[in-house]
Image: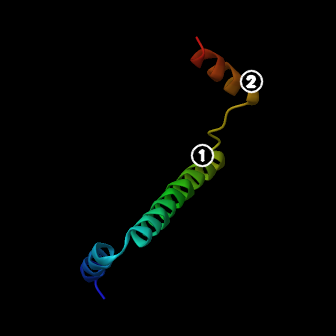
Amino acid sequence: METFEIKKELHSIIDSGNDKFVKNFYKIAKSYLRQLENDKRIFEGEEDIKEGKVHSQAEVQKMIESWMK
């Protein structure tokens, strides 16, 4: 099944679903998208570590203090 067909069928399923189904489907979709974003951030962080793009605890503390000014 092509992506376009899947999207069309999902729209049909959502349109015919009751409130509880739609709300639960929404929660699942949002949770999945949040997890994708978290996975991306973890990957980027791991890449930064590999490349030596890190800060010491003292540097981080100074950054935080500068935000408070």
Of the pair 23 and 4, the residue shown nearer to us: 23
Q: Is residue 17 left or right of residue 35?
A: left
| Res 26 quadrant in image | bottom left
Of the pair 54 and 63, the residue shown nearer to us: 63
Quarter of the image containing the C terminus?
Answer: top right
Q: Residue under label 1, please give it.
A: 48
At mark 2, the secondary structure is helix
Is label 1 in contact with label 2 (beta carbons under 8 Å)? no
Q: Give amino acid for label 1.
A: Asp
Place of residue 54 in the rendered image (x, y in percent of width and height, measured from the top left): 66, 37
Q: Is residue 31 above or below residue 46?
A: below
Q: Residue under label 2, please give it.
A: 58
Q: Give amino acid for label 2.
A: Ala
Place of residue 66 in the rendered image (x, y in percent of width and height, measured from the top left): 60, 16
| Mark 1 burial class by Cα count in 10 Å: few <14, some 14-19, many 20+ | few
| Res 14 quadrant in image | bottom left
- What colour scheme has been applied to the protein in the rendered image? rainbow
Q: How many marks?
A: 2
Q: CA distance from mark 1 to mark 2?
A: 18 Å
The residue located at (55%, 51%) in the rendering is 41
At mark 1, the secondary structure is helix
| Res 25 quadrant in image | bottom left
Residue with the most extreme bottom position:
1
Of the pair 15 and 44, the residue shown nearer to us: 15
The residue mark sitting in front, 1 or 2, is 2
| Mark 2 burial class by Cα count in 10 Å: few <14, some 14-19, many 20+ | few
Q: Is residue 28 left or right of residue 62?
A: left
Q: Is residue 41 left or right of residue 56?
A: left
The residue located at (31%, 88%) in the rendering is 1
The residue located at (49%, 67%) in the rendering is 28
Q: Is residue 8 above or below residue 46?
A: below
